[in-house]
Image: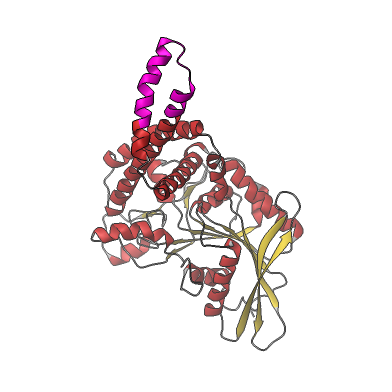
């Protein structure tokens, strides 16, 4: 035994906007971590995952938690290993748009279309694109098209309602009604041909895009998400005893985690309890492509987090390895060893105010050995790759959790 374990660790999982799997997120995470622990621990160890709840004061109340414990095979002495929580900070970004009126959605959507089109044009004309960049550009253009279709649906709905409900009391109103009503009726007739499932998916996608762009470009709900995480860590610190606290984040949840630990304003002191940050499929490349100054002029608490681990799939267009110039490698030196280069790739990441060095992951792990070379099939594979980190239906499939448990609980630490 390398150390003495007196309290368990805590893992706070921050999922992305979309659900990671069916059912309880925290139970799904617990099942997958238990399997990963069993596969990567010394053979005599046995692990148990027990779903339960903790009651916290304030807004969190009764909170789901999975308690993982470890024991030697045949030994009745069970030791607490880690408590797992899930904090749906990213999912809350969509709440205001889900309940928003048609007028508000249309105004936000129109504004984001106007601001995003110049960024895509600059992305196309302003830099030389590799295959990954070209695919991102195609998908970005597709997003604009989908947003425009959603915008037309909203406008047609508004025009139809205006034309039917507004009395034609004078000539100009009558002229507007006479023009708008046939137009809206024709447009709604065409849109009515779209199957309901597609329209529902279109609405969900629109809400996601509005949430993502609103958060990144205007900071909508950012303070709420950061404050929610800080308050949850405060609850853990004041009501539980943990040896270490780890934040494991996925997708949009990674952006919230980075904004929390590396804010533009004064850091919240409660984040000092964070020992390890794990970012899975962080969309930093997409953000920096259209908002290049997003991670600049940041601040931090010294030594927090102690360790930053990033996991990416090279063909995942939403994932970043935080390296400029090569989406496949785990570190700039890796490419230097494989080929002679005119310019060595460099790290990208967080730029802290007053520091010249870029803060980047201490450990960068390529989860899959896929690449973006060759064929239309690679384009479709790139679209699907964002779900390649774990199997949605099977808890026994090899997954990113096999890598995470080795990082959080190195050999000799599980049963200490």
The residue under the point 41% across, 53% down is 318
Residue 130 image position (x, y, % from top left): 27, 52
Taking depth in this image into account, of 275 and 110 the one nearest to the observer is 110
Is residue 181 in sight in this rendering? yes
Is residue 170 covered in magenta?
yes
3 is higher (above) or lower (below) than 164: below
Q: The magenta stretch spans which residues?
A: 159-185
Is residue 295 in sight in this rendering? no
The residue under the point 31% across, 53% down is 132
Residue 270 image position (x, y, % from top left): 67, 51
- Identify the image quadrant of the N terminus: bottom right
Q: Is residue 138 left or right of residue 81?
A: left
Residue 370 image position (x, y, % from top left): 33, 65
**Residue lying furthest left:** 375
- Identify the image quadrant of the C terminus: bottom right
Kindly report the secondary structure that dominates the magenta region of the rendered protein.
helix
């Amino acid at each position: 035994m390398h150390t003495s374990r007196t309290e368990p660790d805590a893992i706070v999982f921050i999922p992305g906007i979309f659900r990671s799997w069916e059912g309880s997120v925290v139970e799904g995470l617990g099942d997958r971590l238990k399997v990963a622990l069993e596969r990567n621990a010394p053979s005599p160890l046995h692990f148990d995952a027990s779903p339960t709840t903790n009651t916290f004061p304030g807004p969190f109340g009764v909170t789901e938690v999975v308690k993982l414990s470890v024991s030697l095979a045949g030994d009745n002495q069970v030791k607490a290993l880690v408590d797992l929580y899930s904090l749906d900070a990213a999912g809350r970004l969509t709440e205001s748009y889900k309940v928003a009126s048609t007028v508000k959605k249309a105004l936000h959507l129109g504004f984001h279309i106007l601001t995003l089109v110049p960024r895509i044009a600059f992305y196309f004309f302003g830099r030389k694109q590799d295959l990954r960049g070209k695919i991102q550009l195609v998908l970005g253009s597709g997003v604009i098209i989908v947003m425009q279709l959603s915008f037309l649906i909203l406008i047609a709905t508004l025009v139809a309602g205006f034309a039917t409900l507004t009395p034609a009391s004078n000539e100009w109103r009558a002229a507007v009604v006479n023009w708008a009503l046939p137009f809206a009726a024709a447009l709604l007739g065409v849109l009515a041909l779209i199957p309901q499932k597609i329209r529902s998916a279109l609405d969900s996608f629109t809400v996601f895009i509005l949430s993502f762009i609103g958060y990144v470009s205007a900071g909508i709900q950012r303070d709420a998400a950061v404050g929610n995480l800080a308050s949850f860590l405060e609850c853990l610190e004041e009501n539980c005893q943990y040896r270490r606290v780890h934040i494991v984040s996925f997708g949009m949840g990674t952006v919230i985690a980075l904004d929390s630990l590396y804010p533009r304003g004064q850091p919240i002191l409660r984040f000092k309890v964070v020992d390890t940050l794990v970012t899975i499929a962080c969309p930093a490349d997409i953000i920096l492509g259209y908002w290049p100054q997003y991670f600049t002029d940041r601040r931090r608490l010294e030594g927090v987090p102690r360790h930053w681990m990033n996991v990416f799939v090279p063909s995942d267009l939403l994932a970043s390895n935080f390296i400029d110039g090569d989406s496949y490698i785990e570190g700039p030196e890796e490419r230097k060893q494989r080929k002679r280069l005119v310019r060595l790739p460099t790290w990208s990441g967080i730029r802290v105010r007053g520091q010249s060095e870029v803060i980047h992951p201490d450990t960068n792990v390529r989860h899959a050995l896929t690449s973006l070379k060759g064929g239309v099939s690679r384009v479709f594979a790139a679209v699907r790759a964002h779900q390649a980190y774990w199997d949605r239906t099977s808890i026994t499939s090899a997954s990113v959790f096999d890598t995470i448990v080795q990082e959080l609980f190195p050999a000799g630490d599980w049963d200490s």
